[in-house]
Image: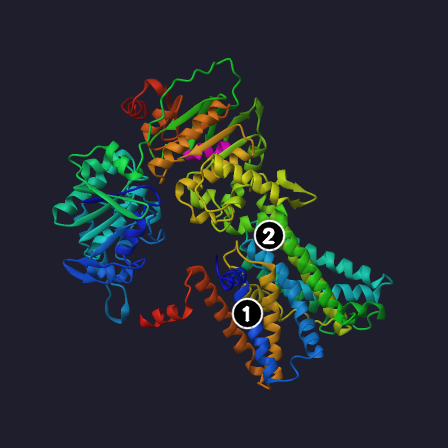
Amino acid sequence: MHAVIGENGAGKSTLMKIIFGLLQPDAGEIHYNGQQVVIDNPITAQRLGIGIVPQELNLVPQLTVAENILLGMVPKKRFGLIDWNKMQRDAAAILEMVGEVIDLKRKTAELSVAQQQIIQIARAMAFGARVLIYDEPTASLTQKETEGLFKIINSFVEKKGSVFYISHRLEEILRIAHRITVLRDGCYITELDPKRTTTDEMVHYMVGREIKKAKRTARSFTVEKTPVLEVDNLTRYGEFSGISFQLYPGEILGIAGLVGAGRTELVRCIFGETQPDEGTIKIHRKEIKHPSPIKSIKNGVGFLPEERRKLGLFPVLSVSQNMTMSTLGKYTKWGRINQRREAVDVNKYIDELKIKTPHSRQLVKNLSGGNQQKVILARWMLTGCKILILDEPTRGIDVGAKAEIFQLLQEMVAQGYAVIFISSELQEVIDYADRILIMHEGRLKGEVKGIETSQEEIMRIALS
Amino acid sequence: MPKITDQIWKRLKFRESGIILALLIMCFGLSLATPSFLTAFNLGMVIRQVSFTAIIALGQTLVLISGGIDLSVGGIAGLSAIIGTMLMTSTAMDPYLCALLAGLFGLFCGLLNGLLIAKIGLNPFIATLGTGEVFYGLILVLTKGYPVLGLPKKFLWLGQGMIGVVPVPVIIMILVAVIVAYVLKNTPFGRYVYAIGGNESAANLVGINVPKIKISVFAISGFLAALSGMLYASRMAGGQPTTGQTWVMPTVTAAIIGGTSLAGGEGTILGTMVGAVLMGVLTNGIVLLNISSYWERVIIGIVVILAVIIDIFRNKKENNPLAYIKKIFAK
């Protein structure tokens, strides 16, 4: 059980892709079971017994569980017909090896993320993998599902399997890894022994500099202030119901809950991407009828969505074009964009937010996750919005960038921004939110103050 | 200090340099092979031939960048040409007013496409395939298959006239190309077109009015198709019921050869123009070299595939195509 850690852009995923044959090394050799091998594509890797559970699962949602597990090695009868009976048996045997029970005939699309991951693991096992690569497997799992995954990994390791494990969750790694390799900027930095190291030491090697934890101060905001956003009895059937709360200027309002609690659905509705079935949204005391993103932005709301690549970025456009997409009107006169004035603003934010990019014309897809996130933040800051909704802003971002983003958030609320902050990492919410709303299965279960609460308390309220 | 050749190379390595190089090589080869290629008469003919589909290809490029495709351009061009010429022959209106009305009719057809796609949610391929059929069908309903003849003399200047040594349609083509290129590069509208093609969900979330932009793009495409239809009618001195029937593929091909991505989000007007001219030169070369014209479509098909392969190299950042080809065959 070999953990590989490093900041985003340290080269972890690239290294794993080389091992799995998706990329070719420019120099160097790979030895497998003591023999030098050339892994020129994933098929070779699978034949050698190397499997991967990628961060973004690559299952075929329309196919059944059994079909997905045996994808690429479907048992055949004569004339090339599929042997369905054998397929069921094989798939069941593999799932049993993994130690999970999932109905083989169900469509994969109907399963939870955790179950889909198990299918991905089962598929790697189906090829008889002896070496499994896990790339950020727990990023979207709940605590309980994570425990289940660890059980699977442990039993695999007990059967003399080897595991490469990439994760940003350092506590997790300390618990389950046998060895830890640290990468930084594409270089091997050191190897750590999980029995002797601490998360602080790991972070130290990962970033090459100490990260000071933002000092927690309880900001006091008086209730006399008028709320900028009021949500009353907001309901979308099947997603969430009866949600009411207020958001005040200068505060960070955290929303905590397990995956599936309806947090993302709630904020998407508040931003106007979906329509509520019941209830009202008021911004600056004014009710918003038929909310839409265009209206929300006009009213000073910004939204950083959960899935950065799918919903937040224009990958083939430049950093500059990504940043000004919501504010082009500012630079436009007689229908023409004044690109010089645009560049002034863009460069200002690149400097201020310390966005690492060679120049503003760089395609945004070439930036690391943390820097992409900063580009999106800059986009909203440019609009002059007063309410910022952040849905999992730190997912898949390295510790250094996380600290920078939180630093930025603190500065923003100090300037009077009101922030709604969703994160699956409870500790983050506790550390940075002034108030925390706790959601569970589409309902609001309670509210706590960030400074007085603990992970245990929040979980207790959520599950009560 | 960087070497001067490096600097020149860097200047040359923009998006469209590959296809421009291909065009130059082709022209050079043809001028060696046959003396009749590099004559003012021949070049003028080639470029005028190209202009009809090139104008439509400009609209098609917009549609493709926005992530759609417009297969109804041929139908719109044909139907607009018929309606425009019928107005000219059956009413006393000024022919250029009739042409303008035909243009507006094309715009309206495009608007219809846009509404079907952006508001009702039809897939662009299916929607425009369907409306295109309707337009072709309406041509036959209106004409019963006979051409509309007897256009006013005054109108023939549009398709047959010259300004200096340059044919009028060519001037219109260049004018439209410059305008569309300017709009794409320098206006919020242009930015939004790229944004929607690059990531429609994100475009919606940053406050772009996605349906409005999509409808506009199809409307522009429809208008340019109608414009081209009128130019062609003037050139042929009559509204031919077959106008536009073979025009759809060349417009898509010109854009694709010019580097426009079928997936949306990428493409330039310069690329499309060069792509259109390249296809015109290719066709011309086939004629001049006395190759049986039956081969024309075979050759064009191969060129399209080659162009897309070159595009893949560019995306893979493979600097050495030969090494890449070797690698493919080594497998």
Quadrant of residue A266 within the rendered picture: top left
Q: Nearer the viewer, mark 1 or mark 2?
A: 1
Q: Which mark is residue B116?
A: 2
Q: Which mark is residue B131?
A: none
Which span is picked out in magenta?
Answer: A263-273
Quadrant of residue A126 within the rendered picture: bottom left
Name which of mark 1 and mark 2 comes first in the sequence: 1
Q: Is residue A128 above or below residue A423?
A: below
Amino acid of disc 1: Leu
Amino acid of disc 2: Leu
* Residue on which disc 1 sits: B21
Camera-side residue: B13 or A225? B13
Quadrant of residue B319 within the rendered picture: bottom left
Q: Is residue A383 left or right of residue A205?
A: right
Task: Give the image location of residue A269, x and y in percent.
Answer: 48, 34
x 32%, y 20%: residue:
A453
Q: What SS does tag 2 mark?
A: helix
Rounded to the nearest angstrom, the CA distance separating label 1 from label 2 is 40 Å
User: Per the image, is A412 magenta?
Assistant: no
Q: Is residue B291 above or below residue B79?
A: below
Secondary structure mostly taken by the magenta-highlighted segment of the chain: helix
Q: Is residue A158 left or right of residue A305?
A: left
